[in-house]
Image (cartoon, helix red, strand yellow):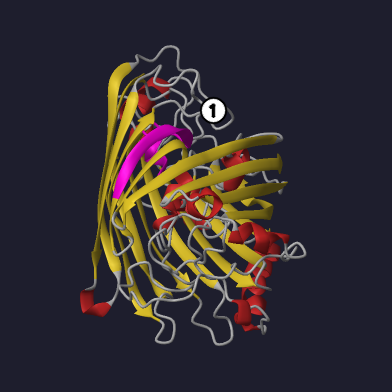
Amino acid sequence: MNFVGGPDPDQRPAEIDEDFMINMGWHKWGWVVLVPGVLVLLALSPTRAEAQDPVIIPGLPGANLPAGARPSPTTWPYTDLPGGRSAASTDTTESPPPAAPPYGLTGSWFGARDTLFDKGIDLRTNLSQFYQGTTSGGLRQTFPYGLKFDYFGTVEAEKLFGWEGLFINLHGESRFGESINRDVGSLVPSNFALEFPKPRGSASALTNMQVEQFLGPDFVVTFGKLNAADGVNIHPFLGGNGINRFMNEAFVLSPIYGRTIPYSTPGAGFSYLRDLDPIFTFLVLDSNGRPDTSGIGHMFSNGASLFAHLRVPVTPFGLPGHQSLEAAYTSGKFSPFSKDDYIILDQPGNHATRRSGSWVVTYGFDQFLVVDDETPTKGWGVFGNISLADQATNPVHWFLNLGAGGTSPLPGRTADSWGVGYYYLATSNVLRETLRPVSPIGNEQGFELYYNAAITSWFILTADIQAIDPGQFEARSAFLAGLRAKIDF
């Protein structure tokens, strides 16, 4: 990576420099033509998926989740929300019990799935394949192949054994192959999905085992092993676990929360809902992330984390959106070099002082600018988040992302979705000063554009490009291109 003024972290430019623009890899005409070409061909080609447009399905975290479709919270014991209706809808017209939602490639298993669904059990599996690499810059020019299985299960206890308002949600993950994450030189993983449950090799884990009990239509308590990425999926443009929307972690969940909210950890809390839209959430979590174990044996061995999220619906000019505030605090002992689920920092931290307590605060918004007249739960809009953290214990001082996304406005491609975003990550002063003599690092920024094309209702093909100015000084400004193929079974 080239900088004006030499490899001094304090001299790193605050904005994208000339080298960042020149070295993005636009001279690699093969990929520059191929990826946009795929986008254009998919966008202009007719689709057979329109009749089975991906919808938001209550109680099914593994369902298709295109950007711009306003998602519902995970479970709905008191109100029937057919797929495609807004979570904020106040229509209480009675309707018949919902039928089983559309299945994927393997269908209904000769009726077995319908039988299980009627008894309150729903099982979903999807496979996401990634072919993604650096066409220029980074640490190495490679194009690794990796794949990810996600397994989702939902149990509705009232149907199964008569316990009203009780739901159990499961999420298992398996990853195989390689990812581009260690070849870019970035602090933020470019491929979120392949970073978990472990960043390398073959690994499987049950990352979410969540019990939810509704105490009324507006209040739910929860406990179990919680997956942080699953919790972001209430957002209309971000989230998606790296398999449905953006690939880069900066737009899946905020990398600044590694100290306070591990990826998968035991916890408990509650949410207050208004018209089935989460307004206020409070959680108590173990501060140590353990995706591949239950985490119970050493729970709270390094303190506890507290998380509060206020998310207020707004409707300027009749268009839906949210204004949100988040705050998190942990009592554990950390340094900027301590293990972090969301930052790639392969540096020894034994020489760094660990301090008690770490905090993060965030302001965010999402706002639809266009809503489909025929399908009010679809449209496109903008989003943004800015976070500030304790730089004495966190490798990240502050973080920003901005972007837009939603369902496709192209005729005949109503099942498609798209997103574009920019992020900036400012590293901790403590981290930079400590590493200056050994392996200096600086701030980081990046850009991502993706387009999801619904080939069928169960097969989504994504073209994705990223431009990153990595935080590691030995890495050059990188241009990434990739394809993602997701199959629902």
Q: Residue 275 location, x and y as percent?
A: 29, 65
From the image, tell me which residue sits under label 1: 294
Q: Residue at x 36, y 79 (%)?
A: 370
Determine if the magenta segment contains residue 260: yes
Q: Quadrant of the C terminus?
A: bottom right
Q: Is residue 12 visible?
A: no
Image spot of residue 435 (x, y percent):
42, 23
* Residue sitting farthest toward the right: 110
Magenta stretch, residue numbers: 254-271
On the image, which quarter does residue 475 sit in? top right
Q: Residues within 10 Å of mark 1 (few under 14, many from 20)?
A: many
Q: Nearer the viewer, residue 211 or 328?
A: 211
Q: Position of residue 297 (x, y in %)?
A: 50, 18
Task: Residue at 66%, 61% (x, y): give it.
Answer: 115
Q: Eyeballing the image, is 37 above or below 169?
A: below
Q: Is residue 6 inside the magenta stretch? A: no
Which residue lies at the image location 66% right of the left edge and 81% below the top edge? 47
Q: Position of residue 155 (x, y in %)?
A: 54, 50
* Residue plotted at (45% across, 55% down): 74
Secondary element at image label 1 = loop
Q: Is 430 drawn above or below residue 14 in the view shown?
A: above
Q: Extreme top residue here? A: 351
The residue lying toward the viewer, choosing from 221 and 292, is 221
Q: Residue furthest front?
A: 162
Q: Amino acid at mark 1?
A: Ser
As drawn, is 385 to the left or to the right of 349?
left
In this rendered view, identify the residue nearer to me: 219 or 55: 219
